[in-house]
Image (cartoon, rainbow, N blue to C red):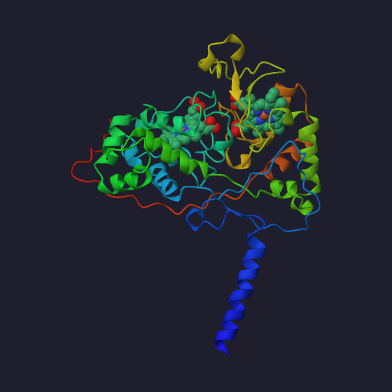
Amino acid sequence: MKIIKFTAICSLSIIIVINVVMPQFTTAADESKIGYGRGGRMSGSSKSSRSDEPIKPIPINFDYDRAKVELGKKLFFEPRLSKSGWITCNSCHNLSTGGADNLPTSIGHKWFFGPINSPTVLNSKFNLAQFWDGRAKDLKEQAGGPIANPLEMGSNHELAVSVLQSIPQYVKWFNEVYASKEMYTDEKIHIDQVTDAIAAFEETLTTPNSRFDQWLNGYDKSITKSELEGYTLFKEKGCISCHNGVGVGGNSYQKFGVAKPYDKDTDTLGRYNVTNDDKDRYFFKVPLLRNIELTAPYFHDASTWDLSEAVNIMAEYQLGTTLTDGETKKIVAFLRTLTGDQPSITFPIIPPSTSTTPEPNRN
Ligand code: HEC
Ligand code: HEC
């Protein structure tokens, strides 16, 4: 009797699991890849898919190399990649606070203040390039920057690699992930592997299933009437011309000050620093507006902490228009629907230093 009951319960749960899981995650069958993309529960009834909208839902993805992502996560939280042995990627891209540090400019090595606001790492894979001025072509190229930046982690690539190389557990992990790849045949850790693993981890830091994405997928009740009116305004006023696609931004460089010169910061030249072309002065990568309510202060110069003010500044400087209080309120309400499921991170445990590990140096 007990066995029959058990079998019945088992088959029932298999049916439920298949029904619930299969339509959304067709790749979920590969066990080794499960666990990084996050699924979602949606409520309400599905009427129409809104595939013609200029904003697209964040895809849910399970197709990750689990061992590489785990290694990348350890490195993201690894303070010994900094000269002081104290600063991690997470110091300035805190995954508890929307992947940014919520400071006007970041605090780095020896308490140096950086020159520019720290963007979030969440959904950064959807950017056409990395940094405000797009000077790194992808996440892998970007990850080498902060380690060796004297104002950030203050180390250099040789030192960072020698720290990892001195810890047998890291050598083992790197070999497990990279030994089979043709590029890496020796037992030495390369900076390329370090940045490749960090980038693989960052690829998993997406935030699907926001209320707005649920609406895009046809669930009418996921957003309120005034949030929807905010979205309509966002399109009608012209915000959408720059902030669109999966990231609601991140796919073009645009001038800050299209309708009116932006006078609060004229020292930061943006894209001009990369191209040296005069017409690129004050052009910046359009920021992603996903999770925007979590990542104040706003703009590359952190000129405001208030999302309503940020929206009004955009209307004034980018579109040459003034919004009524009611319009601003609705657009802000819409922007808040872009907050998605935050990555759920199991805090990594990292292996101890050995007698040959270079010691931290706070100078
Ligand atoms: C001391 C603070 C600090 C540390 C530590 C730091 N970052 Fe950053 N990060 C920043 C700032 C500031 C920027 C923007 C710089 C710019 O655009 O010129 C940035 C930009 C980025 C971007 C580009 C995002 C975008 O939208 O363009 C990524 C990705 C990133 N960092 C990942 C990392 C990783 C990975 C590490 C660890 C290896 C790291 N950061 C360490 C402050 C920091
Ligand atoms: C012509 C292109 C363009 C238009 C139109 C535009 N934006 Fe932007 N937006 C940008 C750029 C570029 C930035 C980055 C400016 C900077 O900090 O250098 C930005 C930044 C922002 C930010 C701050 C993001 C952050 O992480 O700091 C918000 C919020 C924002 N825009 C919302 C809007 C809204 C709402 C509208 C419509 C009222 C709008 N934008 C219209 C290009 C545009």
Looking at the picture, how far across and down is residue 221, in whole percent?
Answer: 78, 54
Question: For the C terminus, which image quadrant?
Answer: top left
Residue at horizontal 73%, vertical 28%?
241
Q: Nearer the viewer, residue 69 or 134?
A: 69
In the rendered view, would you say 94 is above or below 219? above
- Residue situated in front as seen by the camera: 257 or 8: 8
Where's residue 129, x and y in %? 54, 28
Residue 118 appears in the rendering: no
Question: Can you tell which quarter of the image residue 183 is in?
Answer: top left
Left or right placement of residue 351 versus residue 49 in this view: left
Residue at image location 60% in from the left, 17% down from the top: 282
Residue 266 visible to an observer of this rendering: yes
Direction left: furthest residue: 355
As drawn, which residue projects farthest toward the bottom? Answer: 1
Furthest toward the front, the residue is 182
Depth check, front residue: 278 or 50: 50
Q: Is residue 3 above or below residue 327?
A: below
Q: Residue 185's x, y, as percent?
A: 31, 38
Specify whether 124 is left or right of 362: right
Q: Is residue 99 above or below residue 283?
A: below
Can you say whether 324 is above or below 7 in the image? above
- On screen, residue 88 versus residue 11, left or right, reads left
Q: Position of residue 26 (x, y in %)?
A: 61, 54
Instruction: Report the label total.
Output: 0
